[in-house]
């Protein structure tokens, strides 16, 4: 797919400007950037799902056909079939009045298929999940159900907006492995919005960095993270702690707790300039 000259505005105020990028078959592209930089809005524009107060322009070439992004109706045939989405707020995507079994049935999956799909996203007891309503599940459980639903149509492109934020690290690792495997097996491409550079370094083939509605930098993940060109990318990476500022992170924790010893992690040896980015981010999260 190719995105050309994508711009989005609300009441004449441009929030995404002249965005351009391409995505290959089976490729995973991470989209990172500060809060409000336009990550969600630009991905919604690709599926015609912007709020009615927004105006979009630009072109999307997908599987050999070109779509006008200013015309949301023209994008209808892509949604839910060739393009699936997982949004930040899973509760809003599940019908609160339906048991999970029915939510799957409406998407064309029978009970056996639903049980397999739920097992794939890490549920130990899928049969009991099918009998519940969304309000009887946690945010992380609903998110996993949404991920399972998004896979049903075997999309050519999956747009995932912070899909693993609500999940604990073990489940998160399982979901990311599942998505990567699908991408490899079926050629599904993934646009992956996240704030987690550790996940980007582990999971994404390339990364696109946004700031104030513009693409600051795009390139292979290893290149961007090891030798960032844009000043914003450099500052984002510099914010990830190393051994040098481990002490201050732990001091912050000690001050806020005022009781008991410091937690056992990170082990003193664990953080250094050579520690892989993924580990540093995971350790930093556990400190905070
Ligand atoms: N419905 C709306 N009406 C007006 N402005 C909006 C609306 N939705 C989003 N915006 C604005 O569009 C800009 C981009 O928002 P977007 O949600 O894409 O940011 P983001 O990069 O995904 O942020 P985050 O990381 O916090 O999710 C922001 O300035 C936001 O205030």
Image (cartoon, rainbow, N blue to C red):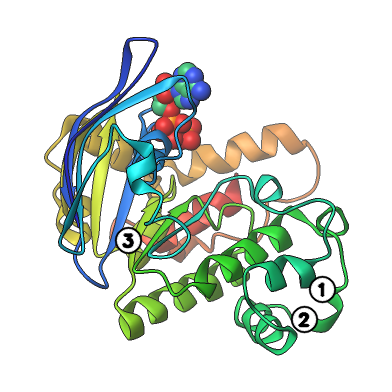
Under tag 1, what secondary structure? helix
When the figure is inspected, residue 275 is found, relative to residue 113, above or below; the finding is above
Residue 21 in picture, x, y percent from top left: 17, 47
- Quarter of the image with the N terminus is bottom left
When the figure is inspected, residue 81 is found, relative to residue 261, above or below; the finding is below
Position of residue 70 in the picture relative to residue 36 (left or right): left
Instruction: Tell me the number on the disc at residue 129.
Output: 1
Quarter of the rendering containing residue 24: bottom left
Position of residue 1 in the picture relative to residue 32 (left or right): left
Q: Distance between the residues labelled 3 and 1?
A: 33 Å
Residue drawn where x is 34% and y is 82% of the image: 186
Q: Distance between the residues labelled 3 and 2?
A: 31 Å
Instruction: Tell me the number on the disc at residue 88.
Output: none
Label 1, residues with CA under 10 Å away: few <14, some 14-19, many ≥20: many
Under tag 3, what secondary structure? helix
**Outermost residue, top side:** 12
Residue 105 in picture, x, y percent from top left: 71, 73
Classify mark 2 as within 8 Å of ligand 1 or not, answering yes or no.
Answer: no
Residue 160 in picture, x, y percent from top left: 45, 55
Position of residue 141 in the picture relative to residue 277 (left or right): right
Label 2, residues with CA under 10 Å away: few <14, some 14-19, many ≥20: some
Report the mark closest to the observer, 3 or 1.
1
Quarter of the rendering containing residue 11: top left
Foreground residue among 105 and 113: 105
Instruction: Tell me the number on the disc at residue 201.
Output: 3
> Are the residues flagged by discs 3 and 2 in contact, CB closer than 8 Å?
no
Residue drawn where x is 39% and y is 46% of the image: 47
Residue 156 in picture, x, y percent from top left: 34, 69
């Amino acid at each position: 797919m190719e995105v050309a000259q994508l711009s989005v505005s609300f009441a004449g105020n441009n929030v995404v400007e002249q965005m351009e990028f391409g995505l290959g078959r089976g490729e995973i592209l991470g989209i990172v950037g500060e809060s409000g930089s336009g990550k969600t809005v630009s991905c919604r524009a690709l599926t015609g799902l912007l709020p009615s107060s927004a105006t979009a322009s630009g072109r999307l070439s997908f599987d050999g056909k070109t779509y006008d992004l200013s015309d949301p109706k023209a994008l209808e045939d892509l949604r839910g079939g060739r393009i699936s989405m997982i949004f930040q707020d899973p509760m809003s995507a599940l019908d609160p009045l339906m048991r999970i079994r029915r939510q799957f049935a409406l998407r064309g999956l029978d009970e056996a298929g639903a049980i397999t799909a739920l097992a794939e996203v890490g549920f130990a007891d899928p049969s009991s999940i099918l009998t519940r309503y969304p309000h009887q599940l946690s945010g992380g459980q609903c998110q996993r159900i949404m991920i399972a639903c998004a896979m049903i149509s075997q999309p050519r492109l999956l747009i995932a907006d912070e899909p693993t934020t609500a999940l604990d690290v073990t489940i998160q690792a399982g979901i990311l492995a599942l998505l990567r495997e699908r991408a490899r097996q079926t050629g599904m491409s993934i646009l992956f919005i996240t704030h987690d550079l550790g996940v980007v370094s582990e999971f994404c083939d390339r990364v696109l960095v946004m700031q104030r509605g513009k693409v600051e930098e795009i390139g292979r993940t290893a290149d961007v993270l090891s030798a960032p060109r844009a000043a914003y990318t450099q500052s984002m990476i510099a914010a990830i702690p190393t051994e040098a500022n481990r002490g201050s992170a732990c001091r912050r924790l000690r001050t806020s707790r005022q009781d008991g010893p410091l937690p056992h992690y990170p082990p003193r040896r664990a953080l250094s300039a050579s520690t892989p980015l993924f580990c540093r981010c995971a350790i930093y999260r556990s400190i905070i």
